[in-house]
Image: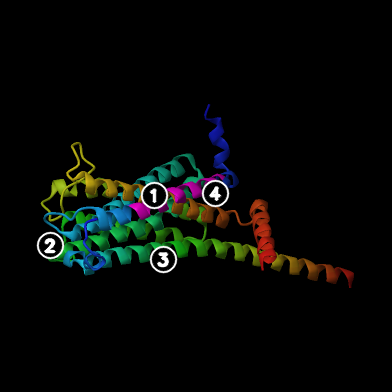
Amino acid sequence: MAFASFSDFIAMGGYSFYVWLAYGISLLSVVFLVINTVSKRKKIFSQVEQRLLREQRIKAAENKEGIL
Amino acid sequence: MWKWLHPYAKAEKSYILSGKLMPWFLALALPTFIVGMVWGLAFAPADYQQGDSFRIIYIHVPAAMMAMGAYSTMAIAAFIGLVWQIRLAEMTVAATAPIGAVYTFIALFTGAAWGKPMWGAWWVWDARLTSELILLFVYLGIIALYNAFSDKVLAGRAASILTLVGVINLPIIHFSVVWWNTLHQGATITKFDKPSMATEMLIPLLIMIVSFAAFLGFMVLYRFRNEILQRESHRPWVIALVKSSSSNDSQGA
């Protein structure tokens, strides 16, 4: 362990602002990337789902017209 | 002998294979990330000149290395895609670019946060920093170009060509600290000599590099699968996949 106490660890030998800023922003940008990637997958799924439902509705409407 | 490779030119097979590989990359990325970060932040000894500010290296160097690694991957994929007209290779280019851009941003930002206490400036216009900034712009250009076309076949080709043009920047970044006088320190690991770093500082750095590489692999596979789904969304296998996932959702609810 390079630090005597937890408050020493947070202080980072006087460089706390720079070290935690670097780590914090890096973590944030990775989290942003993950959210963007996962939500894209969900969006594709819901788009395909909606298209399928729309096709179903169109088919149903066509069948009705055929009966009339 | 190489015939086993052939089915993977088919999107569905590649989708399934990348799905199988993804958990392995994540299983490598997460533990190495935790071990490397705790080791680097709390256990590695402070630098005799830079004190504790040097701990930024544990994200700065892996991010910068993998930003260039991601670009090399894209360049190879772009070449394969253009020469042999393989759509999946072009999808790899599109899938990798955003991750490379984020890594480049991390490298630049952590570099600034490290430069301020050590050099006294957030930013200097020297060769290494400027060429890295150009890398970020090249990444953003590739992403923007790919999104500018609604025809994804054309978009993939355009993005691949831009990727190949941007390769010229890679050696410039790598050798910038040799070719020009700069504030940025020289290579620590990637040189034909002993790494200029104490072992107890170097090991967590290597662990973090592995972690960043594995996470890059994981994210590339994830986004690659997204690209496949997007482009094949009218194919029966994707429709079957969507149907089965939505029926799972309704069972769960």
| Chain for numbered disc 4 | B
Which class describes the residues within 10 Å of circle 3: few (<14), some (14-19), or many (20+)?
Answer: few
Which residue, given by chain and number where applicable, does mark 3 sit on?
A: A32
Closer to the camera in the image, B107 or B205: B205
Question: Which sits earlier in the primary sequence, circle 1 or circle 2?
Answer: 2
Q: CA distance from mark 4 to mark 1?
A: 28 Å
Q: Are marks 3 and 4 in contact (CB under 8 Å)?
A: no
- Answer whether labels 3 and 2 touch (C-beta < 8 Å): no
Provide the residue designation for mark 4: B19
Q: Marks 1 and 3: which is nearer the front?
A: 3
Image location of residue B200, percent across then percent down: 23, 47
Q: Which residues are magenta?
A: B17-35
Q: Secondary structure at mark 2?
A: helix
User: Which one is in front in this view, the residue at disc 1 or the one at disc 2?
Assistant: 2
Q: Callout 3: helix, strand or loop?
A: helix
Q: How is the image coloured?
A: rainbow
Q: CA distance from mark 3 to mark 4?
A: 22 Å
Q: Position of residue B112 (x, y in %)?
A: 21, 63
Residue B119: give its label.
2
